[in-house]
Amino acid sequence: MDLEFGASYQRLREEVREFCAAHWPPRGEEAELPPRDQAIRFRQRAIEAGILFRTVPREYGGAGGETDVLSETVIRQELDAARTPHRSSVQGTHMLVPTLLECGTEEQKQSYIAKTLTGELRWCQGYSEPGAGSDLASLQSRAELDGEHWVLNGQKIWTSQATEADMMFGLFRTEPEAQKHAGISYLLVPMDTPGIDARILKMINGGQDFCEVFFDDARVPAANIVGRRGEGWKVSRSTLKHERLLIGDASGARRSFDGLLDLARRAQRGGQPAIRDAGVRQRLAEIEGYVASQEYAVARMLTAIHKNEDMKVMNEMLMAKLLSTNTGQLVARLAMELLGDEGLTMPTAEDAAMGIPSEYTDSYWVSHSMMTLGTAIAGGASNIQRNIIGERLLGLPRDPRKG
Amino acid sequence: MDFSLSEEQELLQDTVRSYTANECPPPRVREVFDGESGHDADLWKGLVEMGLAGLAVPEAHGGAGLGLLDSALVCEVLGAGAVPAPFLGHTLAVLALRLGGSAPQQERWLPALASGDRLGTVALGEAGGAWAPEEWTLSLQGERADGAKTRVPAGPEAGLVVVGGAGGALGLVDASAGGLRWSAEDSLDRGRRLYALELEEVPIETLAPGTGARVRDAALVLLAADAFGAGTRLVRMAVDYAQARQQFGQPIAAFQAVKHQLANMALDIDPTRGLFWYAAHAFDHLPEESARAAALAKAHITDRAMQVARDAIEIHGGIGMTWECDAQIWFKRALFDRQWAGTPDTHRARLADLGGW
Ligand SMILES: Cc1cc2nc3c(=O)[nH]c(=O)nc-3n(C[C@H](O)[C@H](O)[C@H](O)COP(=O)(O)OP(=O)(O)OC[C@H]3O[C@@H](n4cnc5c(N)ncnc54)[C@H](O)[C@@H]3O)c2cc1C
């Protein structure tokens, strides 16, 4: 047990810190650019400096080097601390890019990866459908090959940021005769293709991120398939291999807990700050137990992955999502109580947008109380997580499968 | 950064685990649990021979000179096995001497504790749940002490008693000197029996000031580790039972409701291990964080373990409510860990203060 990061990581930390100080926030003419362009420039420079996307080969627009999970953690900590816009849409950088690197053609890699890393090209994920959620493989949207094109018909739903995205990576049924999982292909779909209609679905918090997308004989080049016909299910899973490097975001739980402490200092109870109230202190302390557990679980995973001992931390890996979902809900519940009357007001549009807040305002907390429900649903609902823990970790019988 | 156990630490756990699994399997645990004294002298002798009595004793005094994390890892294994051994009180007595003993005091006592010639224990609590060093009232002013302590592990088996006194001071009492009156409490955890202690004109030597709070912090870490072990075992027991028990023509584990209950239990306890690792590490290496980390580990882990224990009984159905079912033994193990040295809420109140909230 050694909780220091060590000299080489300390040097890396300082390098990243200096880089951030030199390049963010932008100065001079660049400060006049729209925020999105500022962010793209920052990411370009960070890639050139070998800080972002370190393992993506140079010929595809990455930094073309090596990394390890601890370096990634140190870098992320510093980029966050300096509040830099290093994260572009996760759908692109964390889902599509790893998939293309693993399964894409040379041409696909050349066309898409570089621009996706900087955020010039934005993606949405077209998986869920009205009839296919947890049971994703039952999806029905079709793609039929007609000469040089795939012809798409059907509907996707809950598609985050579909109206902003330039492209969709989606799953479509191309082999209607094949068995459920074997009939699906992974396609890349330009969102401006005629016959595609993306509509915003107003979210519970008033946010505009959710969409539904309709396909009516939309024609997409035949070359826009990743992997072979009928291998879409496998292709969509290939992303998972890259998730090892992404572990380490318990920092979000700690930031949110610190935000909760600030709220408790600001909110009043019986004429004094709520944080002086014995009951509130108990609940804060109880939540801190979960937050700290999550941090140490992450530290343990980082260590094991760094040493190539992944098997030792299967528990932590399989529990990570449900643990952070549950912690998020505890934070949300107490925050709403502390807000009192402020909890009766709609959040601002800015606070209702998905993502990490720049400030933990009252309005943010109202939105957060609703958006933390999203973590319990998206990316494998909590009951599905319980099945995974029960079956893969505890060795309990699998649910009977029907259809 | 390396948040993991060393090979030696994993080996230590494996060794203690296989020894206790062989020498003290559940039927033997139950025998001692239901026995007259709750003490298994042969088992303790075996553990002493493995070096556990001297784990925390400096090498110069005949011990292994290991840190609190190593002791905590042993507690985890003992908790998992509900092993009826006086390791907790003994280790705390060793730590009291190591942290607060003068050179002659260490010279006199530590070798005897390391070799197991003397069993150590601690008398910290007083009537009315006075576990905090600030609340202790027993006077350590003179050369002799009078007063009463409660919830003392090991009792008459102990050869050396570290007694908590007014102002959070600690004193050393040689149990063979006479003047100690032990009365057995009707202990809930019958594998770790507790005693009330009355001191009458007993010769006492004080340890360095401030040691009381440190020993309390160490106690919190060791209890948290023990509870983690017990909780983890209770999940396993519930899983095994759910796979064996048939209702409606299938193992109850095949009902999703039961599967999810079990998954929630695992999620309750498994991610907490880092809390006691960190608190134990902080005790030896990060003094400013040590008290708060210990309070957090004790409050959170023992609460989670207790919840797991309740759920495990529920999974067992009617048999779970019986003395005959082994789950009750681990339930009481977890309950001891939660109640002894102060309940979770008292430690949450402390950690709020310590956090400057
Ligand atoms: C904020 C947010 C963003 C999203 N973004 C995207 C996106 O960008 N692209 C995209 O494709 N999708 C997206 N989704 C959709 C998401 O992947 C689905 O909502 C999710 O897979 C669940 O599917 P469902 O909504 O159809 O719920 P259902 O599958 O119908 O589940 C409803 C309830 O039933 C439970 N349930 C289902 N099956 C079982 C079972 N076997 N055992 C026990 N309980 C079960 C679930 O736990 C859940 O509580 C997003 C969702 C949210 C909330």
Image: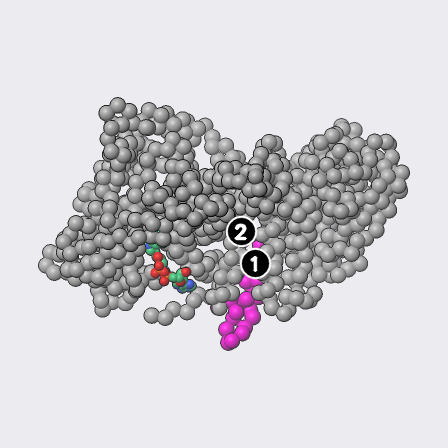
- Residue at the image position 29 percent from the left and 66 percent from the top: A180
Q: Which of the two residues, A28 or A6, is positioned nearer the viewer here?
A: A28
> What's the magenta bit mostly, secondary-structure-wise?
helix
Q: Residues within 10 Å of mark 2 (few under 14, many from 20)?
A: many
Q: Which of the two residues, A217 or B72, is positioned nearer the viewer here?
A: A217
Establish if A374 lies above or below B126. Answer: below
Instruction: Report the image quarter containing ligand 1.
Output: bottom left
The span picked out in magenta is B231-254
Check residue B270 in the rendering and tell me which mark sits there, or answer none.
2
- Residue at the image position 60 percent from the left and 68 percent from the top: B317
Left or right, A176 with respect to A2, comes to left
The quadrant of the picture occupied by the C terminus of chain B is: top right
Q: Position of residue A189 (x, y in %)?
A: 20, 52
Residue B348 found in image quarter: top right
Name the secondary structure under disc 1.
helix
Name the secondary structure under disc 2.
helix
Q: Position of residue A35 (x, y in %)?
A: 27, 34
Amino acid type assigned to the residue bearing label 2 in the image? Asp
Left or right, A392 with respect to B337, comes to left
Amino acid type assigned to the residue bearing label 1 in the image? Val
User: Does label 2 lie on the same chain as label 1?
Assistant: yes
Residue B306 found in image quarter: bottom right
> What subunit carries mark 2?
B
Q: Position of residue A207 (x, y in %)?
A: 33, 48
- Residue at the image position 55 percent from the left and 48 percent from the top: B272
Residue designated by label 1: B235
Q: Residues within 10 Å of mark 1 (few under 14, many from 20)?
A: many
Q: Are marks 1 and 2 in contact (CB under 8 Å)?
A: yes
Magenta stretch contains residue A263: no
